[in-house]
């Protein structure tokens, strides 16, 4: 089951309270499902240490020396849980999450405040708004499950944003949440749909 399939089934905070309601209204992104929140998740494949190891495996230079601080941006971050976990693990690094849904950002900011993290910022912005606001030079840019299902215009805006916020030696990691890469989970997806 992909995060796109589970988002309509999971509309609660980590504490069990409901996220649905008026705060779901926000900037329109053609192709971006706005009527329900996305589930919180952490994708190890987007974490800088994992990305560094994959680059090293292919004999490609990493954006930083081992142990050095870094800046990571997550575009389409949802409530930013993955970034929040990394911000807690890497207090000397900077994390920026961008998502167009206010409910996501509100939830993530509540968690950040509760944890007292100061090295993470979540922004409620469209791709174009994020480009205009600037202030990001990211060593790592993560985009999970967004590019493959938004409009062509928004794909162009997303790619433009990535190219503008990526540091000169930075790396962008893009996850598509589509076949063939997600084929192993199709059977589980069908089971959940049959039981729903």
Image (tube, rainbow, N blue to C red):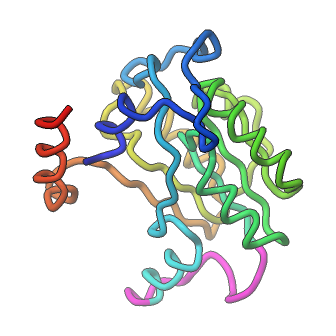
Q: Nearer the viewer, residue 193 or 169?
A: 193
Q: Nearer the viewer, residue 186 or 153?
A: 186
- Relative height, residue 151 to residue 65 (above, below): above
Q: Is residue 74 left or right of residue 5?
A: right
Q: Is residue 71 left or right of residue 127?
A: right
Q: Which residue is at 43% across, 35% downward?
A: 10
Q: Which residue is at 56% across, 49% downward?
A: 163
**Image position, residue 171 (x, y; %):** 54, 65
The chief SS type of the magenta part is loop
Q: Which residue is at 85% across, 56% downward?
A: 117
**Image position, residue 71 (x, y; %):** 73, 63
Q: Is residue 174 left or right of residue 178?
A: right
In magenta, the rendered stretch is 57-69
**Image position, residue 100 (x, y; %):** 59, 27
- Relative height, residue 116 to residue 31 (above, below): below
Is residue 193 a member of the stretch shown in magenta?
no
Is residue 58 a member of the stretch shown in magenta?
yes
């Amino acid at each position: 089951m992909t995060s796109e399939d589970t988002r309509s089934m999971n509309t609660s905070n980590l504490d069990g309270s409901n996220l649905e309601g008026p705060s779901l209204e926000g900037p329109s992104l053609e192709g971006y499902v706005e009527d329900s929140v996305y589930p919180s998740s952490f994708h190890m494949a987007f974490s800088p240490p994992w990305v560094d190891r994959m680059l090293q495996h292919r004999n490609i230079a990493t954006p930083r020396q081992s142990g050095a601080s870094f800046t990571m941006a997550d575009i389409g971050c949802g409530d930013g849980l993955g970034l929040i976990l990394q911000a807690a693990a890497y207090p000397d690094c900077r994390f920026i999450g961008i998502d167009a849904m206010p409910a996501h950002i509100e939830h993530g900011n509540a968690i950040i405040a509760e944890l007292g993290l100061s090295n993470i910022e979540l922004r409620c912005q469209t791709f174009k708004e994020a480009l205009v606001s600037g202030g990001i030079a990211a060593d790592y840019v993560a985009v999970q499950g967004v590019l493959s299902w938004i409009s062509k215009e928004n794909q162009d805006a997303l790619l433009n944003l990535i190219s503008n916020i990526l540091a000169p030696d930075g790396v962008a990691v893009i996850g598509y949440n589509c076949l063939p890469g997600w084929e192993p989970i199709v059977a589980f997806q069908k089971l959940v749909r049959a039981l729903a």
